[in-house]
Amino acid sequence: MTMKKIVLIISLVAFSTAYAQRIDTSPISIYFAKDSYILTESSEKVLDSLLATITDPSEELLLVGHTDSDADLSYNKTLSLNRTRIVQAYLFDRNVQNRIHIDWQGETRPLNSNKDEKEKTLNRRVEIVRNYRGPKNQLEKLTKPAEVFMIDPSRDTILVCKEGTQILIRAGSFVTEDPTSPVEIKVTEFYKKSDFILNNLTTTTTENELLESGGTIDIRASAGNKQLELKQGASLQVLFKDKKADDGMEAYYAREGETVTKWSTNTPPGTNAGEPILISKSFKIQNMDTMQIVSELILNIGGLHYKAIKTEKRGRPSDPMVESMSTSLLDPQELTRSIFFSPDRAITVRATGRINCDRLLIPENSRVVNIEVPGDKVPSLSIALDTNNMIIPYSRRENNVFIFDNVPMNAKFNVLGIYLDDSGIYFGQLKNIVLSDSQKNSQEYLSLNMKRCTENELRAAVQEIDEKRSN
């Protein structure tokens, strides 16, 4: 048996083991001419059809390059890499923001025996795997448990969670079959950087913009075994524990089913984002015998702020209440001075699920950071900034190199990698890395080694970064 065939057999075994858990759909194939990595017209049409169907920015793609068996292993490995990169470039040039993983296998994963030109043509390809999620959710066993509340859905309720979050749930907010049956509310709070790392949360948007987080909560409602949603137009008022009046933070929502959570200000499907948003409220009672209630509210309607004064009164204790309302547009100065904007005002949330309290952070300068992880493991890999409460995920992966596109300059950060499989836990960390302005036009290259550890050792190492939270 020749050395080339021995290498081929070994590579096939290794590849099948590494990819057995990763590929969950039939791949789309892009074909190339002999010795070429130029896209053909027919290949571009296939890619254009694919682009029309990529509507979920949380979907990840896996591109794997291949060749026929002509030429030697080294040449074919490089050729398959170039084929994969040209497909990746085509997608990026058309503004695909999704995370893309690429691998290149050369001739080591043929579809056939390469005995004639027809068979070789089928091996000159790049396979595109949709809905790629990596092995499984590696960190699932490390995820944080929820706090459980039982509420009466027919009454206004304020939940006070153990880490400081407060949630106002108005009566009748949920779609229920029986409005008198108790509703179970599960709330999970994520305020520490270690919470973000161990639960695959990030502080980036679906457009890969950077966010600075004031915390994340996960709210789930159920009755019996049925998950409940908010009624059309209903909302929750959520007070994140560190929310300030002038911090510019707002609600960002996660998409269901993501392995790595990114965020968007777009409300999830099925919610009514056009309803007025109650920003604050104050009221006073005058003349208890005749019961006059004056409520003053500030509303956000279509991006404009209004002050509404609602009066409810009756002439005698036995009379019905009569309502009247007056509304006026607020100018920005009056809005800023308004006494109704308390330092810890709540955020209006229009859906259950994961909600992040964030503001955009636009660095003056940023840099590409490439992190190589030796070996064949594909860990959960993140950058945690010291100077801001931010967790940045990698943008794309090329074999065992993880690429971060938008890391702020002059910011100290740690790199953390976690990998779990049936054999145990692997962890790697790079501490106190700083990108200096003198290198702002180049890329940073780092190497991260993964080592075996216990769950307690992992949690202790990750929790070290909690002390480096932004003020």
Image (cartoon, rainbow, N blue to C red):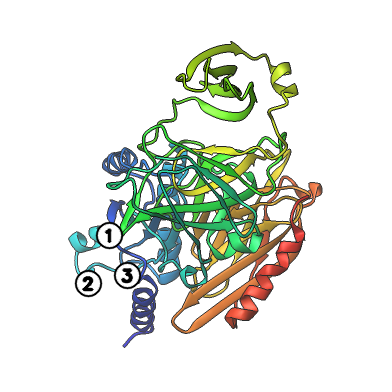
Please identify, in this view, whether the residue under mark 3 or under mark 1 is nearer the observer. Answer: 1
Residue 310 image point, x, y percent: 55, 18
Q: Sequence order check: which comes first, mark 1 or mark 2?
A: 1
Residue in the picture at 56% in, 17% down: 311
Identify the residue position indicated by label 3 in the image: 109
Q: From this viewpoint, which residue is outermost toward the bottom?
A: 1
Please identify, in this view, whether the residue under mark 2 or under mark 3 is nearer the observer. Answer: 3
Q: Which mark is residue 25?
A: 1
Residue at mark 1 to residue at mark 2: CA–CA distance: 24 Å
Residue type (three-letter) at the residue carrying disc 3? Arg
Task: Using the rendered view, name the quadrant where residue 288 is placed.
Answer: top right
Q: Is residue 12 at least partly visible in the picture?
A: yes
Q: In this rendering, is residue 211 above or below 443? A: above
Q: Is residue 395 at least partly visible in the picture?
A: no
Q: Quadrant of the N terminus?
A: bottom left
Residue 29 image point, x, y percent: 28, 54
Identify the residue position indicated by label 2 in the image: 113
Badge 2 element? loop
Q: Nearer the viewer, residue 447 or 379?
A: 379
